[in-house]
Amino acid sequence: MKPSSPSKPLSKYEETISRVINDIADRKLRPNQRIIEKNVAEDLKISRTPVREAFRTLELRGYLTKNSSRGYSVTDHTIEQIQESFESQEAIETMAIRLACTRIDQKTIKQAEKYRDLIKEAIHRRDIVSCMEYNSQLHYLLCKASQNKTLLRFYEILMDKPFTKRVLRLFTNSELNKWADEHDKLLEAVSKGNQNIAEKVVRRHYKTVFRVVSERTL
């Protein structure tokens, strides 16, 4: 799924999806916790129909699990599942970034630099939701610069992970700042066409994520 961009106000269906995802990220909803359609509808002051549709979508996207007799609950992902997902994304992104080094233009570099700056501002505010969104925009932009539609299609699928916000919330402020500083090195390598350094930075980026996930509890 592509990262979102500013648009018209959210529909009731979209509002429900956004609320549930953010509540999971904020740990207001914990793994295996039951989530009740009626309660969500009353909380958002909307009918149950868009909530029901949103729950089905969230199930398909891996955020919720449908139980035979108890409705839905928050999906509990194992450390192994999380690491496997990030490993797959790393493999696709490193291939794409090497191609981007030879195909990116200055306009795209400038756009990426804007997202880099927005990430740092969001970290300063400890705004994890915005940080994740800008980070997704930056990495998607660089992968798109590979001009390889097949790689981009796989990357879009792997981007939509139900636990990314939860993972970012495990980072300390110091770790987030160091993680964000890696973008400076990445953009410098890509702009200079240095494939080996760009790939090394991407792999270091993911290595940090793997370490944090393995050491701390979601």
Image (cartoon, grey):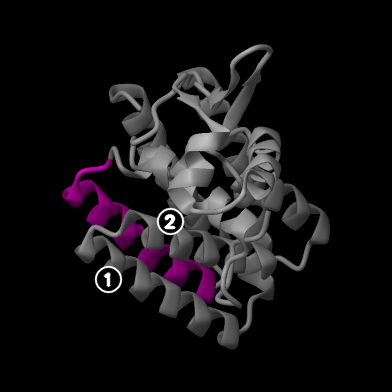
Q: Quadrant of residue 193?
A: bottom right
- What residue sits right under mark 2 in the picture? 132
What residue type is disc 1 on? Glu
* Element assignment for label 2: helix
Picture quadrant where residue 161 is located: top right
- Residue 41 is left or right of residue 213, and the answer is right
Question: Which residue in the rendered view is the most extreme toward the bottom?
Answer: 107
Indicate whether 106 appears above or below 135: below
Q: Residues within 10 Å of mark 2 (few under 14, many from 20)?
A: some
| Mark 2: amino acid | Met
Could you tell me if residue 200 is visible in this image?
no
Sequence-wise, the earlier of marks 2 and 1 is: 1
Q: Position of residue 113 (x, y in %)?
A: 43, 78
Find the distance from the CA under tag 2 to the CA under tag 1. 12 Å
**Residue sitting at x 34%, y 35%:** 27
Numbered tag placed on residue 121 in the rendering: 1
Choose between 118 and 44: the one closer to the eye: 44
Name the spot of residue 190 as percent of width and height, x first: 53, 69
The residue at the point 32 percent across, 53 percent down is: 179
In-front residue for pair 187/69: 69
**Magenta region: which residues?**
171-191
Q: Quadrant of the C terminus?
A: top left
Q: Is residue 62 above or below residue 31?
A: below
Q: Nearer the viewer, residue 184 or 165?
A: 165
Secondary structure beneath label 1: helix
